[in-house]
Image: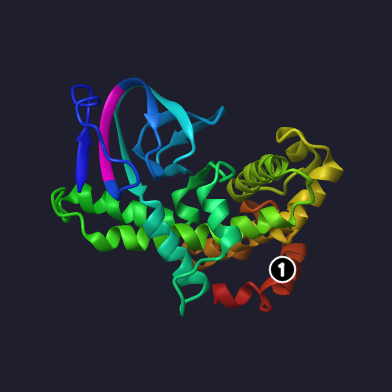
Amino acid sequence: MLNVFHAQSLHAKPLPRRSNLVNYSLFKTLDSWIDFRSFSIKYVCNGLEKYTVNQNTYHVKSGQYILANEHASGKVEIESNEWVRGICIDISPELLAEALASQLRPDTLCPDLNLDRFFNSPDFLDNLYSAQQTAVGQLLTQLDASLSSGALSPDAIPQNLYYNMATALVQDHIPIYLSLQNIPSVKWQTSKILYKKVSEAKAVIEHQTHEAIDVAQLALHVQMSPYHFHRIFQKTFNISPYHYSLKVRLNHAMTLMAHQKYSITEAAMATGFSDISSFSKTYKKHFGSSPSQLTL
């Protein structure tokens, strides 16, 4: 079932809690409290939506989404000269529990109790995600394209959309749950705060493909000491900030040479390497083959 919301219909349709729903919104101006009825995914197709969820502020841009469970509360604000288009998907806790059980123990309907508590308690991690980086994001992108092109009728949302979304949500969040377990902290709330900080830093690294990161400056950006930042990042993602930056830049260089026909020199310069020799050595160490094999 798909519901369409605009300025005239925002409060006209009371929606059920703990259900599977797709809501499509179109606003230029909005300032409203929001109700997280189930596991709610708030995806921005185009424009900017400002969310305040559990006292955390998220500026959600095109191709990004936030996710929170039914224990969350907050508000959404939109102020734009152009139409801001969004999709909200509700996944019922019961369906998510089935997806979780299937992922962890395919031979039983009994899910892992600790993970079940993680998903269904107030301790669940509300956060901002890029659609390009997650399984949920890929499904959201496909859904937006299908609705926009008319390939999918708003009156014919297939039931397997919810099954696939629940499975993707679990797949995306099991690594997050495990990462939270790795963060050395007495309090779960502190672990969540630290995870958000290093996740923000990780996103910065992923967008900085043109030069090496300054770890100290990045630590300052997320309000952590360089030592603490390095330690928590390493424990969370099993790689240091420096080596993650190197990995991102090398992957980008490979893409430039393989798909955009950059020369070795052009790719090295575009990803912040000072000379071809150091770039070639680092590239070969990382991929096991020299960059010249891509440019032949």
Q: Secondary structure of the magenta portion, mostly?
A: strand
Indicate whether 258 appears above or below 177: below
Quadrant where the C terminus lies?
bottom right
Most distant residue in the right direction: 227
Regarding residue 61, the answer to whether it shows in the image is yes
Spot occupied by residue 104 in the image (x, y as percentages of width and height): 52, 71
Where's residue 17, x and y in %?
33, 41
Considering the numbered disc 1 on the image, is that residue within a helix, a strand or a loop?
Answer: helix
In the rendered view, tell whether residue 35 sits above or below residue 23: above
- Which residue shows up at 43% across the image and 26% down it? 75
Q: Left of 264 or right of it: where is 172?
A: left
| 51, 101: nearer the viewer | 101
Within 10 Å of the Cα at label 1, are there few (<14), some (14-19), or many (20+) other Cα atoms?
A: some
Q: Residue at point 28% right, 53% down?
A: 143
Amino acid under disc 1: Ser
* Residue nearest the observer in this picture, 268 or 225: 225
Task: Name the image quarter holding residue 286.
Answer: bottom right
Residue bearing the label numbered 1:
280
Foreground residue, 23 or 203?
23
| Residue 195: image location, x then y, percent | 67, 46
What's the residue at 56%, 74% (across, down)? 294
Residue interval drawn in magenta: 22-28
Taking the image as shown, residue 35 lies to the left or right of residue 247, namely left
96 drawn magenta:
no
Q: Residue 18, how many percent across, how many down?
A: 35, 46
Q: Is residue 192 left or right of residue 132?
A: right
